[in-house]
Amino acid sequence: MLNPQRSLSELPKMSGPSQAERAVLEEEFNWLLKEEVHAVLKQLQDILKEASRRFSIPTPGLESQLKQENFILGSSTMDQVKGVLTLQGEALTQADINLKTAKSNHVMHFTFRDDKQWKLQQIQDARNHVNQALQLLSGRDESYHFKTGAEVNKLMDAVMLQLTRARNRLTTPAAMTLPELATSGLMKMFTPPMPGDVMVNFYINLSKLCLTVYQLHAMQPNTTKNFRPSGSSVLHNPGAMFELNNAKFEVSQVHKVECVVPWLNNTLVFFTISLQLCQQLKDKISVFSSFWNYRPF
């Protein structure tokens, strides 16, 4: 037990790194800044270029670079909605949807018009964030000499911010109001045109491409039912209400079907690996910084 009468100056001092150790540490740190940082940056660029390639917009005459893929929509709990979606990068180039109505058991069939494609905003945004991360990395090629750990950390923080935003766009679908869905350009994509009591929405959730179909019924103008407009949501439930062009509607049925897109799953893995590489480099910088900032009692 410490003697309370002893002063701090009499306590044993923690020994910091010796001059020789500091010289070795400085040499290792300079090697880290000159060699290892650029090796990590190269690795990050290779991973993100592969991710970006999957997002790419088809180039006229080079469509084979980004193949069209067909995905069958399905659900384990219902068969009211069935369909096949064709995805090419960020674009839904075709949709073939069958909807069985609850009242008549009649099957309605819709497809995209031949002159229409639907761009998935989430994939567009994710691609843009990946490209911004690549621009940050390409601005520091192998001829560039990092002078401080803080400079490396600043770059890693900026890259990690873009990667986190890219990942969040694929994992967090945008919330929309029912009037926004009703007036969306997506409703004008189909032939025959969607009837007024049906709305659809496409979105990405992690590695899944999802289709939600809403069946509506018009509320009587003189209805005594308490009208409560619904707010924004990714998925609206039956009973949700909204008003459009002075008419009031209520969601009577909601059908959600989805399909797994393998390359989206691979892209999310690329984001995770890249974020880990950035953090590992920051951790190494932190270890050296703890020595430089060390002050004995």
Image (cartoon, rainbow, N blue to C red):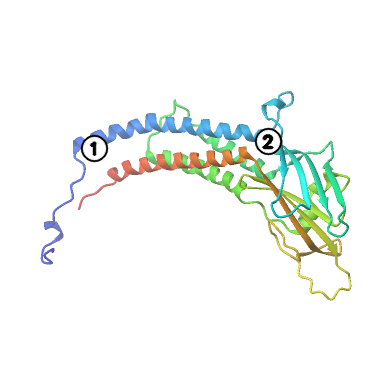
Q: Position of residue 209 (x, y in %)?
A: 68, 45
Residue at x-position 69% and y-position 52%: 76
Alpha carbon distance from label 2 to label 1: 51 Å
Residue 33 picture quarter:
top left
Residue holding disc 2: 89
Classed neighbour count for the residue bearing mark 1: other residues with Cα under 10 Å, few (<14), some (14–19), many (≥20): some
198, above or below 270, in the image: below
Residue at x-position 44% and y-position 33%: 40
Q: Nearer the viewer, residue 238 or 125?
A: 238
Q: Position of residue 73 (x, y in %)?
A: 72, 45
Q: Nearer the viewer, residue 84 or 250?
A: 84
**Label 2 amino acid?**
Gly
Q: Position of residue 147 (x, y in %)?
A: 38, 34
User: What residue occupies the far bottom of the structure in this picture?
Assistant: 224
| Label 1 residue SS | helix
- On residue 22, which mark appears? 1
268, above or below 9, in the image: above
In the rendered structure, the answer to whether residue 45 lies left or right of residue 96 reads left
Q: Nearer the viewer, residue 30 or 245?
A: 245
